[in-house]
C-alpha cells in the first residue's frame, strides 16, 4: 500500500519550494504576456485607426485647399463640424466613443487633400460615414477648420472648440 501512494506523499521543503517557484514563474510570465498582448493590440488599433490617411491616392493628397487662410471658411467649417462631426469626434475634436481624436499627430500632419479625401469617402469599416453628399465647398470648409486646429498647442484644446483667429489686415 505504501508503494501505491508514494506519489501522494508530502514533498520535502525543496519539493514544495520548487513547485511554488514554478507556479509563481508561470503566473508572472502569464501576466507579462497578457500585458504585452494588450499593449500590442492597443498599438495596432491606434495604427489601424489612422491607417486610412495613408490610403489616400497621391492625386488626392496633392489637392490644395481653396479656402486656406480664409477666416470666414474657418468659422463656417467650425459650424459644420459641430453639425456633422461633434457627435463622433467630440466637442473638442479630441475623440469620443465613435470617432478618433483629430488632434493626433497623424491627422495634424495630413495634407488638406488627404483630409478632404477622407471626408469625402469616409472610413466605412471604422464607422465613419461617407460625406460626399455635403457640397464640396462645405467639405473644404471643414478641412479648413481642422487645419486651424494645427495652429493651437494640443493642451489648449479645452472648453469650447475655437480656432485661432487669424490677424486680418
Image (cartoon, helix red, strand yellow):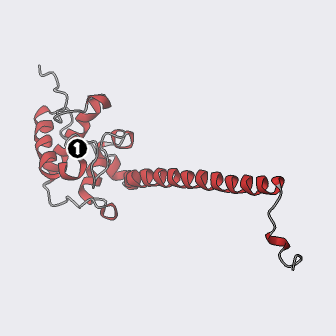
Quarter of the image for residue 8 reads: bottom right
Circle 1 is placed at which residue position? 143
Quarter of the image for residue 157 reads: top left
- SS under mark 1: helix
Q: Nearer the viewer, residue 130 or 35?
A: 35
The structure residue drawn at horizontal position 81% and vertical position 61%, both measured from the top left corner, is 11
- In the orientation shown, which residue stands out farthest toward the front? 1
Expressed as whole percent of the image width and height from the top left, the position of residue 139 reads 18, 50
94 with respect to 56 (left or right):
left
Q: Classify 114 as above or below 122.
A: above
49 with respect to 17 (left or right):
left
Expressed as whole percent of the image width and height from the top left, the position of residue 66 reads 19, 41
Expressed as whole percent of the image width and height from the top left, the position of residue 71 reads 13, 32
Q: Nearer the viewer, residue 37 or 17?
A: 17
Quarter of the image for residue 45 reads: bottom left
Q: Would you say residue 54 is visible in this rendering?
A: no
Q: Classify 163 as above or below 56.
A: above
In the rendered view of the protein, which quadrant contains the N terminus? bottom right
Q: Nearer the viewer, residue 89 or 121?
A: 89
140 with respect to 2 (left or right):
left
- In the orientation shown, which residue stands out farthest toward the top? 169
Expressed as whole percent of the image width and height from the top left, the position of residue 104 reads 35, 40
The structure residue drawn at horizontal position 46% and vertical position 52%, both measured from the top left corner, is 42
How many marks can you see? 1
Amino acid at each position: 500500500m505504501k508503494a501505491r501512494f508514494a506519489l501522494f506523499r508530502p514533498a520535502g521543503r525543496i519539493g514544495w519550494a520548487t513547485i511554488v517557484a514554478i507556479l509563481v514563474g508561470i503566473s508572472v510570465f502569464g501576466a507579462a504576456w497578457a500585458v504585452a498582448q494588450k499593449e500590442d493590440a492597443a498599438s495596432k488599433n491606434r495604427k489601424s485607426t489612422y491607417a486610412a490617411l495613408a490610403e489616400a491616392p497621391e492625386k488626392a493628397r496633392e489637392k490644395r485647399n481653396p479656402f486656406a487662410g480664409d477666416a470666414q471658411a474657418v468659422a463656417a467649417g467650425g459650424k459644420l463640424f459641430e453639425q456633422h462631426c461633434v457627435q463622433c469626434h467630440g466637442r473638442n475634436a479630441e475623440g469620443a466613443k465613435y470617432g478618433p481624436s483629430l488632434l493626433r499627430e497623424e491627422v495634424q500632419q495630413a495634407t488638406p487633400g488627404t483630409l478632404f479625401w477622407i471626408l469625402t469617402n469616409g472610413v466605412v469599416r471604422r464607422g465613419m460615414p461617407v460625406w460626399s453628399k455635403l457640397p464640396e465647398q462645405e467639405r473644404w470648409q471643414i478641412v479648413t477648420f481642422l487645419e486651424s486646429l494645427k495652429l493651437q498647442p494640443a493642451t489648449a484644446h479645452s472648453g469650447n472648440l475655437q480656432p485661432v483667429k487669424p490677424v486680418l489686415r
